Amino acid sequence: MSSRLAKALLSDDPAEQEKLLREETLRHAVSRAIFCAITEKVLDVRAAVLFTVKHNGKSGALVMTGEAWDGLSADTLATAAELGAEVEVIDGRELV
């Protein structure tokens, strides 16, 4: 277990727990994907975005660069909202 994950689990501050767990989730996704799903550039956890969507019992996730997300986010989120899908976005640029 990473020391950051242990710190999150032992923290008394729920906001700190949430932030550290989101960071570790993004770090794990970036380490598995290595390359952006859109641009095929090498991912950097500090600037990557993990986009997860759940709808009708199915789920999927994409890891991409922040630049790729910036180009997709408005349309993607609007479509997800129209479909009534549950969306989670972890943006590494906001976690720093």
Image (tube, rainbow, N blue to C red):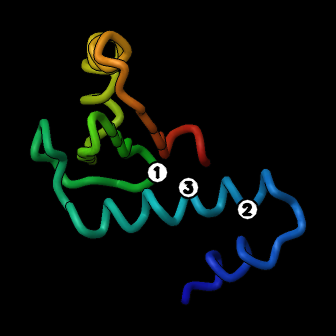
Give me the disc on residue 46: 1
Badge 2: residue crowd in 10 Å (few <14, some 14–19, many ≥20): some
Say whether residue 91 is left or right of residue 74: right
**Residue found at x 65% / y 62%:** 20
**Residue found at x 15% / y 47%:** 41
Q: How far apart, in angstroms, are the residues tagged by discs 3 and 1?
A: 12 Å
Residue 43, given in percent of the width and then of the height, sits at 27, 53
Within the image, what quadrant is residue 31 found in? bottom left
**Whether residue 91 is situated above or below residue 86 in the rendered picture:** below
Q: How far apart, in angstroms, are the residues tagged by discs 2 and 3?
A: 9 Å
**Residue found at x 26% / y 42%:** 64
Amino acid carrying mark 3 in the image:
Arg
Determine if residue 62 is in view: no
Give me the disc on residue 75: none
Give me the disc on residue 22: 3
Determine if residue 35 is in view: yes
**Whether residue 48 is situated above or below residue 22 in the rendered picture:** above
SS at mark 2? Answer: helix
The residue at which mark 2 appears reads as 17
Quadrant showing the N terminus: bottom right
Residue 35, given in percent of the width and then of the height, sits at 16, 55
SS at mark 3? Answer: helix
Badge 3 or badge 1: first in the primary sequence: 3
**Residue found at x 49% / y 46%:** 92
Residue 77, given in percent of the width and then of the height, sits at 36, 18
Q: Relative to the observer, which residue lies in front, 41 or 9?
A: 9
